[in-house]
Image (tube, helix red, strand yellow):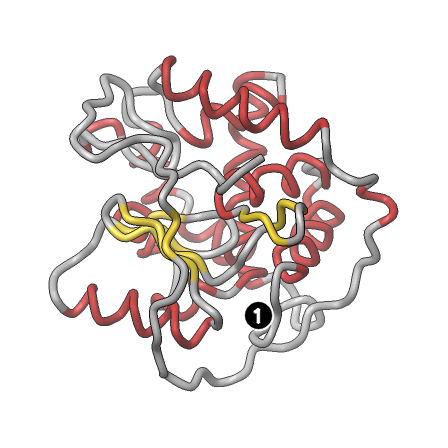
């Protein structure tokens, strides 16, 4: 699978356009949402795709989770900008941060509930705003996880490959993922609220919480690349959740 990620990015564009956009009743961004936003879209997309809800719920926590009152919860307005993970109070703040860095030349950054990398996957979205939309972000991640599951025949290994193809990074991520998935509340007990239709964005920004627990420190070399980063990039995907 040396060029599989590039192939996924380039050849999957038309298929992913359908996957990401879906039907009008489900296309949504939950623009005012908090930690429940990622869980809501994870449940919706699990129903759409057949990817187990607990897999998606665990992935979004592994990617963006932070503790509040002792509970690990995902956060949709998270950006990992070239190795620095930052949480924002709102989508508008996160979007403004990403766009300001983009204008300054940044391309390697991850956004949203499932931390999709702009450099390698941005062409499958209409723009950065679209990539931030929780439902679009989740659909893309689920489609990719489905492909990894078809390869590995194991959701734990698919989750590890979602992060990295380098064994030491993948195994560390998988251990974290397994711990999180084992401690999830019953996914069936989490109500599914239909996501709201996309609304225009208002661009304002204030950087808030910084995630100080990157899984891979910048400068580490990855012999085999993370699944959301092509093998030729020479970098690995970002951070572990805070706490847990």
* Residue drawn where x is 40% and y is 70% of the image: 129
**Camera-side residue of 44 and 220:** 220
* Residue drawn where x is 42% and y is 20% of the image: 170
Q: Is residue 203 left or right of residue 112?
A: left
The quadrant in which the C terminus is found is top right
Pick out the residue farthest to the left: 105
Query: Label 1 neighbourhood size at 10 Å, few (<14), some (14-19), many (20+)?
Result: many
Pick out the residue farthest to the right: 189
Q: State the SS at label 1.
A: loop
The picture quadrant where one finds residue 179 is top right
Q: Is residue 96 left or right of residue 91?
A: left
Residue 55, image x, y percentages: 66, 35
The picture quadrant where one finds residue 26 is bottom right
Residue 136, image x, y percentages: 53, 59
Pick out the residue farthest to the front: 69
Q: Is residue 220 left or right of residue 167?
A: left
The quadrant in which the N terminus is found is top left
* Residue drawn where x is 62% and y is 17% of the image: 153
Residue 105, image x, y percentages: 12, 61
* Residue drawn where x is 35% and y is 43% of the image: 9
Against 207, residue 143 (above or below) is above
Name the residue tied to disc 1: 29
């Amino acid at each position: 699978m040396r060029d599989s990620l590039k192939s996924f990015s380039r050849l999957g564009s038309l298929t992913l356009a359908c996957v990401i956009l879906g039907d009008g009743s489900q296309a949504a961004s939950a623009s005012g949402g908090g930690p429940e936003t990622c869980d809501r879209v994870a449940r919706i997309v699990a129903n759409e795709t057949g990817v187990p809800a607990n897999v998606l719920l665990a992935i979004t926590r592994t990617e963006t989770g932070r503790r509040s009152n002792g509970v690990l919860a995902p956060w949709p307005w998270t950006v990992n900008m070239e190795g620095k993970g930052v949480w924002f109070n709102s989508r508008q703040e996160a979007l403004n941060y990403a766009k300001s860095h983009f204008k300054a030349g940044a391309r390697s950054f991850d956004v949203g509930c499932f931390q999709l990398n702009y450099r390698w996957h941005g062409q499958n979205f209409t723009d950065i705003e679209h990539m931030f939309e929780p439902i679009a972000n989740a659909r893309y991640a689920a489609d990719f996880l489905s492909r990894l599951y078809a390869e590995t025949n194991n959701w734990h290994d698919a989750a590890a490959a979602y992060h990295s193809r380098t064994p030491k990074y993948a195994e560390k991520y998988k251990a974290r993922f397994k711990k999180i998935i084992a401690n999830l509340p019953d996914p069936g007990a989490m109500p599914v609220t239909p996501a709201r239709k996309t609304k225009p964005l208002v661009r304002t920004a204030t950087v808030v919480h910084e995630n100080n627990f990157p899984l891979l420190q910048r400068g580490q070399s990855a012999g085999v690349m993370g699944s959301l980063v092509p093998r030729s990039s020479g970098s690995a995907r970002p951070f572990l959740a805070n706490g847990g």
